[in-house]
Image (cartoon, rainbow, N blue to C red):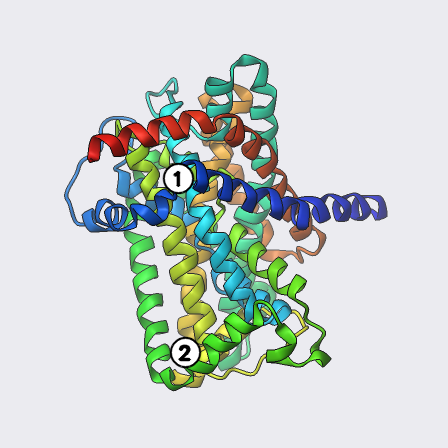
Amino acid sequence: MELIVKVNSFLNGIVMGWPGMILLVGTGVYYTIRCGGVQFKWFGYIMKTTIGKIFEKKEAGEGSVTPFQAVCTALAATVGTGNIAGVTGAIALGGPGAVFWMWVSALFGMCTKFAEVTLAIHFRERNDKGDWVGGPMYYIKNGLGKKWVWLGMLFALFGMLAAFGIGNMTQINSIVTSISGTINSFTPINVNAANLIIGIIVAAFCAMVLLGGLKRIGQVTERLVPFMAVIYIVSALIIFFAHIGNIGNVLRGIFVGAFTPSAVLGGAVGITISAAIKRGVGRGVFSNEAGLGTGSIAHACADTKKPVKQGMFGIFEVFADTIVICTLTALVILCSGTPVSYGAAAGAELTISGFTTTYGGWASIFTAVALCCFAFSTIIGWGLYGSRFLVFLCKSNKVARPFFVVYALVAILGATMDLGLLWSIADTFNGLMSIPNLIALLLLSGTVVQMTRAFFASEG
């Protein structure tokens, strides 16, 4: 066990530390330069093409989902507990300045996600059921050639292992902890029994959605993601405007704290600019998953013939996840005046405190519901990803349904056990996924640049 801890700690320090972050953000910077700052230059057009067409009625063809259902499925997997608990942890350990670096990573991450989605559509293929399948393992195989298939299999292996941890057990654990904790605060209950019951219920719903296939996954996420996002955004904006008088000091803390944390927090806290950058960039990258390649798996299912146009949904995805939702979580904490113990680990309790400051004690129920919706959507999204990883490794679509059953049962396990080391190991596999994906992105950059230039030249 001690050896496992040491090996995991070493690998985690690489993929989740400075080397991994530099590679992730560096790829985003590289693509931004080569694609002419597409996420900035064409931002208005991108928003018009994506969010501007949400209410357009469109039926997807056989074996696919609509472009909007695809982005909702991708957002379902990325908008998880990290948007509530992860952001608070970044602020507590990196100071308010971590929010600035979270923005920076997201701005460049938009172009990384754009490239991933564009390649996923361009190099996707039909499986034996007639469904569109794609993502890093497919643009590695079909874009780089057969001699690179081993890299795609490595990505799929890391991804499948991460699916059970980051995508499933840690999310269900957050759900049961949130629900049972909230109920227990009003009336004493047997927490262990409650966790088991909640775990079984969530696992049943998870199985019902996943076993319904691609169409049902798209239909559920199409309804769940906008609903949970709008409710959370509106509630957070109310808090922001209720404490808008504090915005000057908050913005000062974010921008000054990004470069001189001691000027905002005082030297006694011990938070350095290095901590602010690491926590902010880390939260940004692993919130929107730009560079991990996972979101492109959902986008590859879209009923579209224009890779670059679907790539715009990738830009929108990062914008919605990090620039909007993560920022609002940060503002709920910082604008409401919620006390933060800087230098100490923190989680969802800070966000809950931010809401209860304005709404009162009942807001803990709202935050618990929001956390559950975010976490459940992540479980569904990663369920799809996990099945795609296993199908690629086994070269057979027959393993998908058994995987969904096992995946749902694992959720019950995650609801009833102390995750401990598992969280860290799953986190490491999550980071390891980025290495094969980033290698492929850099090698295929010429293809993305060529398609991008051709598309926007035709758009005038």
Residue 364, x across and y down, in percent: 45, 76
- Residue at 51%, 70% in the rendered image: 255
Q: Residues within 10 Å of mark 2 (few under 14, many from 20)?
A: some
Q: Secondary structure at mark 1?
A: helix
Nearest the camera: 154 or 162?
A: 154
Q: Which numbered disc flags the more N-terminal residue, 1 or 2? A: 1
Q: Amino acid at mark 1?
A: Phe
The disc at residue 114 is 1
Q: Are marks 1 and 2 in contact (CB under 8 Å)?
A: no
Q: Is residue 129 above or below residue 72?
A: above
Q: Secondary structure at mark 2?
A: helix
Nearest the camera: 33 or 208?
A: 33
Q: Is residue 122 left or right of residue 257?
A: left
Q: Is residue 396 above or below residue 420?
A: above
Nearest the camera: 416 or 130?
A: 130
Residue hosting label 2: 363
Q: Nearer the viewer, mark 1 or mark 2?
A: 1
Residue 86 occupies quadrant: bottom right
State whether residue 341 appears in this view.
no
Residue 191, x across and y down, in percent: 58, 69
Residue 50, x across and y down, in percent: 25, 46
